[in-house]
Amino acid sequence: MISFDEALATILSAAPPVTPQQIPLAESLNRVLAEDVHSDVDMPPFNKSAMDGYACRRADLPGPLCVTETIPAGGVPKHSIEPGTCAKIMTGAMVPEGADSVVMVEHTETVSEGRVRSLKPYTRSNICIRGEDVKAGDRLLGKGTLIAPEHIAVLAGAGCAAPHVAARPHVAVISTGDELVPPTERPGLGRIRDSNGPQLTAQAAAVGAIVQYRGIAEDTELALETTLLEATATHDVIIMSGGVSMGDFDYVPQVLTKHGFRIRFDRVAVKPGRPTTFAVGESAVCFGLPGNPVSTFILFELLVKPFLYLTMGHRFSPPTIGVPLGRRLHRRKTDRDAWLPVCLTEEGLALPVDYHGSAHAHALTQANGLVCMPEGVAEIAEGTPILVRQIR
């Protein structure tokens, strides 16, 4: 059995090199940049008015000033600003030569037709200087950036209409177990609906992977072999739930070994999820996760999600928040790290949710974070500051 940190390092070391591809900007949300993006222009590209008002020389204030023209956004000034003159200007418009200030329109009054004066003897410049935000050649976004809506604006402004992004991994999700029936069926005696398959499919899709749920494999070597070989023919990552523990019908490790996968570990010092298996094959990697749904969910968040992101060149860092614990946490066995679901309350506390163990999937719907009790720790007192790993 290895520590959680060792398991994560082992998994991340197996991530393949990124394969870049070019896609339209409109399709790039939640994709990962495969190269740095640099600006091809200064931003702003010219001295730009930050206000509706009058472009003028500060030395001429308060005026009165003669209005020589009106400059709309997108227009080009026809005249430079000479002593005693100004130009009416709109927000975003190019500031004419000679002007060093824009007086806000609400701070002016009309003296006579074509003549205005400032109601204040001094004004801020209200001018955005060319290149003050970005200069041509500046790096705007780095390789490995997970593209969010705000990045779309930056890419568009840089003229990056077809960014190079990392290809998405192809993921196959397989549930194992004779006790499972599809969600469409009503389970008979001794059977349960497969919840892990749909859950893992959704988790992998949320990361951005191309996911295929390949259904339920029976607890026989032949069924597992057939399903595994079909999946590895077309997928980079296989995620299997169940069949990795010590039961008489837990065949996943031996099937993986039989077909050329090298098992890097099969036990992790974490609760829930000790019988987690990670194996590397010639063309794919395989995660063998426990069968209980809370274990499956948590181990995906802790181990699989960072790996999938790294295959796209993104170093995933989970969002965390430090808050006081709202209720005491206590346990008897301390031989493993324990991850427990908590709810962040409006009062700014992390409150443990009612949790009956790794089969209690409903507990996760009440939680929006996970908290770790490190190995060797039996109790965390109420009010203790803790770090919560947010899951939504």
Image: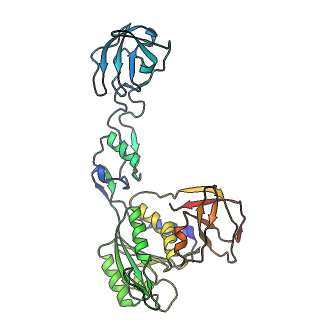
Percent x, y of residue 223: 35, 88
Percent x, y of residue 43: 37, 33
Residue 218: tell me if it is visible: yes
Q: Going 60% across and 56% down the picture, which residue do you hit? A: 346
Quadrant of the rendered structure where residue 227 is?
A: bottom left
Q: How many labels does the image show?
A: 0
Percent x, y of residue 365: 52, 68
Left or right side of 107 for 212: left
**From what the image shows, is residue 95 above or below residue 346?**
above
Percent x, y of residue 129: 41, 26
Quadrant of the rendered structure where residue 374 is?
A: bottom right
**From what the image shows, is residue 338 above or below residue 168?**
below
Left or right side of 303 for 269: right
Q: Going 30% across and 24% down the picture, which residue do you hit? A: 72
Residue 104: tell me if it is visible: no
Q: Going 39% across and 71% down the picture, which residue do you hit? A: 201
**From what the image shows, is residue 137 above or below residue 31?**
above
Which quarter of the image is occupied by the N terminus?
Answer: bottom right
Q: Which colour scheme is used?
A: rainbow
Quadrant of the rendered structure where residue 310 is?
A: bottom left
Closer to us: 284 or 202: 202
Closer to us: 360 or 78: 360
Left or right side of 160 for 373: right
